[in-house]
Image (cartoon, rainbow, N blue to C red):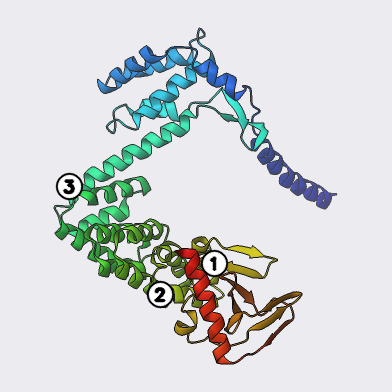
Amino acid sequence: MKAAARITLILYACVLPWQLIYGQAAFPEPNWDRALAVETAQSINTDRVLKSLFQSARAGDNRQVMDTLLTIEQNDGWPVPAREYTIWSFTLGLADMDMNTVSPEVLDYLSAYQPRTLVAHDDRDSVGVALFNISAAAAGVRNSWARQRGGGRAEILLQNDPTLWIEAYLEAGPAERRGFTDALDFASDEQLDALARSAIERLSDHPGLTAVAGKSALILADPNLLQHTLALGSGPDLHPILEAAANSLDAEETKALLFQAIRRGPNNKAGLAIALLAPVLLDDLAVRAKMFEMLENLDLGTSAALVLGSAAGAMAEVGWVLLLTRFFEGLGFVIVAVTAAADTLRVGDAYYHDVYVLETDTLLYVSLPQEGRVLSIRKDSGETIEFTPSNDQERRRLYEEWKAVRKSRTT
């Protein structure tokens, strides 16, 4: 009996927390139609009250701010959506004001506000969400002020040793770090160079410094510092850095950055570089050739195909054919792995006659002379592939015919 009782208690102990968790996870139901709530919120002219709130905030009269907020919340003469709209509008406005414009007590009140105007969630009608999310707006205020605080501190530290600036950045929270990088806009070239080099030295251990090194290098327009940042940096900050580099560096500098990423890896970094840098370089024959070469790479082939496809208006056919309607000219002369293939080809039930085919280890590139387009066919598609070789002179004629059609379509 004692053993059975112990088992029963264990089962209850397992079931009870699950019931509590399930109860806590229950979502509130909507109590307002969205359009009606918006209309109701705007039915009251709240401009005078809002103006009074902001005046009290700017004057540092936190007691008056709190009294006014509580009066609005409890004003039975206003519908609930109008009350919450007023408090929410005031909260949003605080983000644009100087940090600490209102006291922590006011921010705590706004952060703890429980919304009463609930409308249907966009993806689930039975779930109610706040139409005026005051607590979320308060969190935005805290982040905005933390960013201001970080920026002010960073500007002061710019006058000191860059090591102190870097240490302070590493100790800061996410919002304050954004303030630190904001301050880079006001740094001198000498300060930026020193910060970039100090950050690069520590990138391996502190990937968060990628933003510092990258932005400093971009402001300086220093491709060498950018290459070091790309080689050693990591994390989400690489995306905006590479995006900005594509728009600010010249073509040769951008190409050097792209080829370095592909050469040195890792694949996730190389894929990101292909996605962000290659599209602006596709007029360069070497870059085009590299993208076609990357189609062979199991890890990077998708990134290369997306770049080529987006530029060419590519589309997929029956799961195994990718149409690439540009960037094929010269391929046979720049990709060493390509070898002579055939001018008559059958893939499954599809038959191609008088075509120009280039073959790699895993793909067949088929140019259709009369249509001026290209097919990329995987050799491991499972379809039966048969082709008939022709002499080099005939293949050359087909290729020239294809080039002529492409040229006529682009002029």
The span from disc 3 to disc 1 (Cα, nearest Å) is 55 Å
Q: Is residue 132 above or below residue 39?
A: below
Q: Amino acid at mark 1?
A: Thr
State the SS at label 2: helix
Label 2 CA crowd tier, 10 Å (few <14, some 14–19, many 20+) = some
Is residue 171 rendered to the left or right of residue 5?
left
Give the residue pinned by disc 3.
156
Using a 10 Å C-alpha cutoff, classify the residue at mark 3 as few (fewer than 14 neighbours), some (14 to 19) or many (20 or more).
few
Q: CA distance from mark 1 to mark 2?
A: 16 Å
**In whole angstroms, how far apart are the C-alphas of marks 3 and 2?**
48 Å
User: Depth-wise, is mark 3 or mark 2 nearer the camera?
Assistant: 2
Q: Amino acid at mark 2?
A: Leu
User: Visible in this render: residue 300?
Assistant: no
Q: Helix, strand, or loop for circle 3?
A: helix
Identify residue for label 1.
Answer: 325
Above-or-below relation of 266 to 5: below
Are circles 1 and 2 on residues that touch, CB within 8 Å? no
| Residue beneath disc 2 | 285
Q: Is residue 176 left or right of residue 384?
A: left
Rendering coords of residue 294 (x, y %): 50, 75
x, y (%) of residue 351? 72, 76
Q: Is residue 406 left or right of residue 245?
A: right
Which residue occupies the foreground of this view, 342 or 131?
Answer: 342
Q: Is residue 317 above or below residue 20?
A: below
Q: Give x and y (percent) for residue 98.
A: 27, 32
Q: For the point 60% across and 87% down, which residue is it?
A: 341
Q: Is residue 403 visible?
A: yes
Asked if marks 3 and 1 touch (Cβ < 8 Å), the reply is no
Residue pictured at 67% horizontal, 65% vertical: 317
N-term mark: 1 or 2:
2
